[in-house]
């Protein structure tokens, strides 16, 4: 195979990747500034995702500099794949796996005990399938670093890996939407909160799934075109979806416990206001007696109504 095409799309993919990395960095900064109460494990996971995303954008920059600057005007060098490309694939695999397992953990805690494993086991199997196919792609490219050989891996490893991601993403979204919609609540504010979470889950799927499906069904025979336009982006979409879900928790908490919270009345006792002593004359003994009208205290206690 001669000089591979698609270096223009590689440049565009790298620019979009750098832009998404900036959003990842901003979201990571916002997370550490706002979520002090999170566990050390959660904070370590966010740090790991950001460090991996930093390594990924570094490998992308190295790859583009190698092809577009260092070896400009040297056609023979463009027939080989530089090491930073398969390295970026490995980084993507790790980031996507972390994010999908995070949402699998969320589904595990939301599911009823009888249904947990019916949902989690297929999801974990899809995640492991993606890891296996994607790592096989990276290893094959490391060993045989030519574009002519790497193009054959599309049908045996890259397409199955993309299909596994797509199926896992659909399963995650359907599971989250089903669990949230079946969490019936009589409290209007809680209903609005659940509807908001459903919208977030659907938007996340609509953001990631088209890219993943395009990776799976693209008809190009040039692996580099596929990699430059989609593989450089999809990992950062997953990283941003994870950080966005963590950063929106405080916003959702504030809207679920604001001043308009639904109130539950424990006891209400109505009484007339206190009256002065009134003279009451008996009809039988015609003796003037004094009757006292006692005032009752209104006892109204309120509490926030949560499901």
Image (spheres, rainbow, N blue to C red):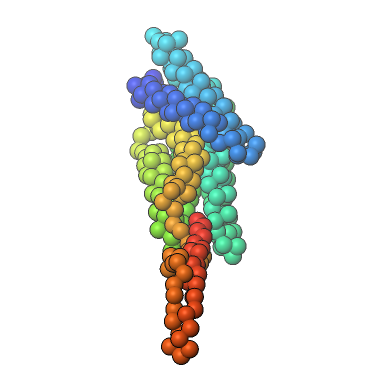
Nearest the eye: 262 or 126 = 262
Q: Residue 205's image quarter?
A: top left
From what the image shows, is residue 267 above or below residue 215? below
- Is 219 placed above or below 80 here? below
Q: Residue at x 44, y 72 (%)?
A: 278
Image coordinates of residue 120 in percent, x first then y, are 57, 54
The tally of labels here is 0
Residue 66's spot in the image, x, y percent? 46, 14
18 w.r.t. 119: above or below: above
Q: Tell me if residue 209 can be seen.
A: no
Q: Residue at x 38, y 33 (%)?
A: 221
Q: Relative to residue 104, is residue 13 drawn left or right? A: left
* x and y, in percent, of residue 41 in the image: 64, 38
Horizontal and vertical percent position of residue 16: 39, 26
In the depicted view, which residue is nearer to us: 274 or 135? 274
The residue at the far bottom in this view is 284
Q: Residue at x 44, y 57 (%)?
A: 262
Residue visible at 46% across and 58% down? 263
In the rendered image, the quadrant that contains the N terminus is top left
Q: Seen from this angle, which residue lies furthest right? A: 40
Q: Is residue 287 in view? A: yes
The front one of 175 and 144 is 175
Does 272 sit above or below residue 260?
below
């Amino acid at each position: 195979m001669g000089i591979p095409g698609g270096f223009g799309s590689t440049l565009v993919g790298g620019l979009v990747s750098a832009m998404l990395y900036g959003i990842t960095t901003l979201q990571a900064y916002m997370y550490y500034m706002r979520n002090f109460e999170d566990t050390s494990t959660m904070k370590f996971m966010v740090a790991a995702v950001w460090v991996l995303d930093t390594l990924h954008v570094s490998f992308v920059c190295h790859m583009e500099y190698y092809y577009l600057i260092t070896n400009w005007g040297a056609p023979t060098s463009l027939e080989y794949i530089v090491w930073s490309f398969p390295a970026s694939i490995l980084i993507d695999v790790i980031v996507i796996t972390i994010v999908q397992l995070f949402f699998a953990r969320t589904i595990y805690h939301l599911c009823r005990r009888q249904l947990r494993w019916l949902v989690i086991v297929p999801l974990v199997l899809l995640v492991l399938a993606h890891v296996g196919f994607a790592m096989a792609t990276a290893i094959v490219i490391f060993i045989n670093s030519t574009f002519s050989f790497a193009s054959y891996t599309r049908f045996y490893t890259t397409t199955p890996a993309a299909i596994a991601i797509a199926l896992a993403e659909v399963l995650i979204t359907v599971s989250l939407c089903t669990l949230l919609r079946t969490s019936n609540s009589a409290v209007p504010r809680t209903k609005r909160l659940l509807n908001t979470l459903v919208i977030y889950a659907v938007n996340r799927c609509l953001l990631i799934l088209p890219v993943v499906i395009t990776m799976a069904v693209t008809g190009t025979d040039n692996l580099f075109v596929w990699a430059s336009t989609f593989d450089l982006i999809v990992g950062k979409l997953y990283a941003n979806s994870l950080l966005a879900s963590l950063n929106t928790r405080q916003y959702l908490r504030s809207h679920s416990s604001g001043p308009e919270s639904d109130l539950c009345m424990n006891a209400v006792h109505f009484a007339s206001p206190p009256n002065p002593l009134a003279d009451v004359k008996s009809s039988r003994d015609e003796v003037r007696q004094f009757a006292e009208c006692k005032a009752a205290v209104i006892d109204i206690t309120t509490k926030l109504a949560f499901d």
